[in-house]
Image: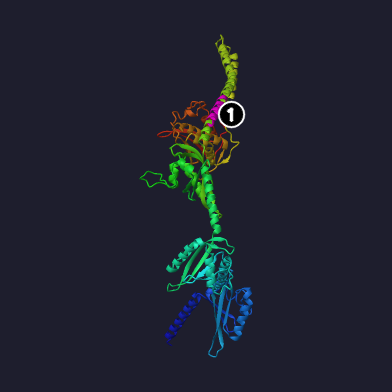
Amino acid sequence: MDIDVYKKTEAALREREQHLAQLIDTVPAMIWSMTAEGRPAYLNKRMMEVTGATLDTVTAPDGALSLRKMIHPNYLELAEQTFIKSVVTGAPYAMKYLQHRADGTYRWTETRAEALRDDTGKIVRWYGVSVDIHDLITTQTELNFRKQELTRLVDLVPSFIWRLTPTGEPNFFNRRFTDFLGLDDGGLEQPRTEPYAAALKAAIHPDDADRLWAELKHCLRCGQAFSMRYRLRRHDGVYRWMDGRAEPLRDEGGGIVQWYGLSHDIDDQLRVEEALRESERSLRQLVETLPALIYCAAPDGAPIYRSEKLREFLGFGLGDKLGDEDDEGRAGLAGTLEAIIHPDDLPDVKEKYGFSLATGSSYAMKHRLRRADGAFRWVETRTAAMRNVEGEIVQWNGICFEIEDQVRAQEALTLTQERLARAAQAASLAELSASIAHEVNQPLAAVVANSHACQRWLTSDPPNLERAQKTVERIIRDANSAADVVGRVRALFRQTGEARDPCQLDAILHEARGLMTEEATRRRLRIEVDVEAGLPPLDLDRTQIQQVLVNLIRNGLEAMEPAQRGVLRIRCLRAGDQIRTEVRDTGAGIAAPERVFEPFFSTKPNGMGMGLAISRTIIESHGGRLWAENNQPGGATFIFTLPVETKADHDR
């Protein structure tokens, strides 16, 4: 048989069925069907995705419909009864309820179902659709609530609400306004134009009446918004300042239908503003008379206020340009800092101030500030953030104290302390030298005496070899005694590994820098540190390595002091299986780089020549090496290395 037409029809039906299935699954609604007896037969894809339900979860063990997992308990009984009634009577099913969703939430849903009947009117199947109406229900609830709120707002808002006709006649006052004027509302729903007009005319202050009516007539004629401050008499006879405003309501053609106005009692506000202005004047006088330099800055650090004393000290104000006449000016933060901070202090000030701006932490630093006459004066600056209730920075407040005399006195005191320390060191060295000389002198004298005796025994005729041999033995004994004395002296400087612990060399370096920062500042110098990230810890005697770093930093600062300007740079990095530390100065350099490590050799007039010798001993006892190199074109670099796996040299 020729079945070509049959096959084509079958394919077309399958394609149409597939298209219909896709349509049902993609339509933005939850579609389902039931048998004539009300048993679940089909749930489209969207319904299963939205509710998380399947045919199994909505089918009871007896095959009936189970809504327990789909409908909120408060609506379950009503939904079941309504559905059963529709199945029994064949009436359409419609209900709004809270539907359980796949994410565990409940949303308002409207479900409708109709019965499909055959030619005899018998129900063949039920088809239903469920639509999410949660947003609609929520919006309607919100609208009803807002309507009630607006109704109460008119009477409860702490302002006076009024309405005028297009010709300016008052036809509505809210309850607060009538209470203020002392009017009997007599039922606010009824317009009372004449009593309102009379009460309003009597309440306006005589000094404000002409101005108010003239402005109101102008607005009524031109259709412009009304805004004015005036005084109204309260029911007890007291006049209060009001801020009145009104806007016209227009129809589609632009014609004015009504005027709606609001008057707000600002009498207390005006009194508070006057009190605040007086308080501000008092506080400003207090700030201007304080013996300090005060300033304020925006959250980004841009200056926004300088006290009069600070403006006089600097010689310029906020609006003044900081460049040449042809320059556009540098009134921002960077330009201000460059104009007033000493060049040697500027990098540290920028670093610390930038850190404070980034983190919100307080800022405190001593630096030099340029005065209007060009002289730099030492000041101590402290800045803290002012925050709002949310914790956000709204302003930076700072104060500067001039400490020039204090710094000079501290420098003089430090110099005196250094002289005393050098004198004490010299005295200690002299005492140590005398003690060493005394201890060594005895065995050396014995060596000399025995040497002369040995010479006599050898030059006698015949030579007395036996006695000469005994004398030589005594010479050896006395020489060993002298060597023991020297060994005990060297033991004073021998380093051991007993107090060594794993330490981060960069942490020790920053501690040493902190110890020497004040001395560097006194000498008008700066210390910069560059440490490679990720350096491993080393087994070190923390105090001894810190002693070496402090000694090298002090030597570098003393070498750079004649210039009174410059940067001592310290660099720490890994070089193979060693950690390399460089201390680079810009002084005059070293004539004999190797001799400076010899004991008692010094290139300084008052130096003892022991610091570098002890430093080299410490580094070598840690398994490292210390040496010096001259820089090009000038200055010197002291370099020491430490092995990553440091081991004490117990044999030295």
Q: Residue furthest bottom?
A: 120
Viewer-nearest residue: 570 or 208: 208
Q: Is residue 425 magenta?
A: yes
Viewer-nearest residue: 72 or 479: 72
Residue 199 seen in the figure: yes
Q: Is residue 69 left or right of residue 212?
A: right
When the figure is inspected, residue 650 is found, relative to residue 162, above or below; the finding is above
Where is residue 296 shown, x and y percent of the image? 50, 47
Q: State how the image is colored.
A: rainbow
Viewer-nearest residue: 590 or 264: 264
Viewer-nearest residue: 550 or 576: 550
Which residue position is annotated with label 1?
Answer: 491
Q: Which quarter shows the N terminus?
A: bottom left
Where is residue 475 shown, x and y percent of the image? 58, 18
When the figure is inspected, residue 241 is found, relative to residue 337, above or below; the finding is below
Residue 346 seen in the figure: no
Where is residue 101 shown, x and y percent of the image? 57, 71
- Mainly helix, strand or loop, the magenta region? helix
Q: Quadrant of residue 466?
A: top right
Q: Is residue 222 magenta?
A: no
Q: Residue at x 62, y 82 (%)?
A: 84
Q: Residue at x 60, y 37 (%)?
A: 499
- Classify mark 1: residues with Cα within 10 Å, few (<14), some (14-19) or many (20+): few
Q: Which residues are magenta?
A: 413-427
Q: Residue furthest left?
A: 326
Where is residue 110 shown, x and y percent of the image? 56, 77
- Residue type at numbered disc 1: Ala
What kind of element bears circle 1? helix
